[in-house]
Image (cartoon, rainbow, N blue to C red):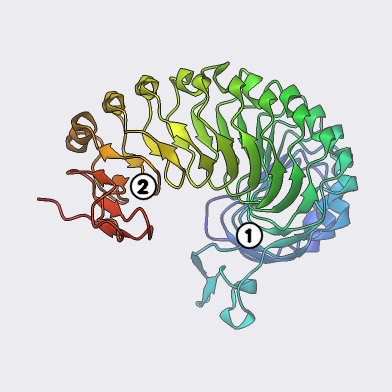
Amino acid sequence: RILYLSDEYSLIGEIPAEISRLDHVDSISLRKNCLYGTLPPELGELPLKYLGLAENAFSGFIPETLFNLTSVEYVFLSFQNGNRWNCTRSRGGIVDIYYSHGDQAQGANLGLQGKILGDKISNLSSLRTISITKNQFSGTISTDISSLKQLENMYAESNKIRSSIPTEIALMENIRVLDLSQNYLTGEIPQDVGNLKRLEYFALSGNGGLSGPLPSSLFELKSLQYIYVQENSLTGKIPSSIGMYQDLVGLNLGSNEFTGSLPNGLYNLTNLMFLYLHENSLGGSISDKIGQLTALTQLSLYGNPFTGTIPSSLGLCEELENLYLHETNLHGTVPEEVCALTMKSLVPQEYNALSADCYPDIETLVPFITCGCCDICCDHVTLECVTAVME
């Protein structure tokens, strides 16, 4: 009942219409091969519970018959474009699936298209996981998405979905992973997302058009571990409820329009490893309590009008690998306790590790911050950054 030929890099060509003869098969896994062309409508005639076609080079519109798979629980159609591997035909010749039909002359493969989250999605009420990342799916998100009561994982990033987020999304009571990043979503994030009691991973990054406040109800979810909403147009203050539960591991609010100071609850997130607040309009001072976030490996605060000095308690965050403090109104000297981290975890590797406004100010010729351990120094006025010369 299972057709499993995944991770072989050996299957080349199109799925034939004759696949409909496999009427005894309920699971098909053909992941990571060199399959291309359109999906045959005959797939919708099979009694499938599992359809795994990710990491190939399929293109064109998905057949309407796929919405006949009323018993399907798992659908994996992700990564149909941008893949860089070759397969060799048995009679010689290379198939490069980066290109349409594996042929460079036909141009880059664009992936699958269609309105997969439209009204007909309600037919697939048995779905537990749908993964459609990195394709060309478009259309809007239907209010009928509320029919997906069994859905646990939705991976839909990097498509062309143009939609607001319907409030009905809050009725998907079993959802654990909700990723709609890198689309064209607009409007506000519904307050009702706080009803998703099992939510663990929430990602809406890179949509650009999402606006309004970040729902405070998000931080009332006990299971939530990751919130990624960077690169949007979200406004308002960071909710004071942020520290209600301490299981949050990753928080990225960067490149939005948040204002106000950092709420005290933020310093209660002692399991937090990734904190990105860069490029907002956050002000006020950075509390000494930031030293309580000892699990931090990434801290990005640049591009905000923070005032005051850099707290020496940051030296207690001994797991820090990257600390970005440039383009702020912080002044004084980078504390010795922070510089001591450059001998531990805060060491430049693939990325620069420590930045501040320690380049001579173009107006005063005096650095805004004195730093003897930064590997990147920026001019507070021009925002130009240079690699620091370490003695």
- Label 2, residues with CA under 10 Å away: few <14, some 14-19, many ≥20: many
Q: In the image, what residue occupies the spot 68% across and 56% down? A: 159
67 in relation to 262, above or below = below
Q: Which residue is mark 1?
A: 80
**Is residue 111 or residue 247 the one in the foreground?**
247
391 in relation to 147, above or below = below
Q: Amino acid at mark 2?
A: His
The N terminus lies in quadrant: top right
Residue 51 appears in the picture as rendered: no
Q: On the rendered structure, is 190 left or right of 234?
A: right
Q: CA distance from mark 2 to mark 1?
A: 39 Å
Q: On the rendered structure, is 255 left or right of 315?
A: right
**Of the image marks 2 and 1, the number of the one nearer the N terminus:** 1
Dot 1: what SS?
Answer: loop
Q: In the image, what residue occupies the spot 60% across and 41% down? A: 229
**Residue 341 lies in quadrant:** top left
Spot occupied by residue 271 in the image (x, y as percentages of width and height): 44, 22
Residue 341 appears in the picture as rendered: yes
The residue mark sitting in front, 2 or 1, is: 2
Spot occupied by residue 171 in the image (x, y as percentages of width and height): 82, 28
Which residue reaches farthest front? 364
Q: In the image, what residue occupies the spot 79% across and 39% down? A: 72
**Residue 166 lies in quadrant:** top right
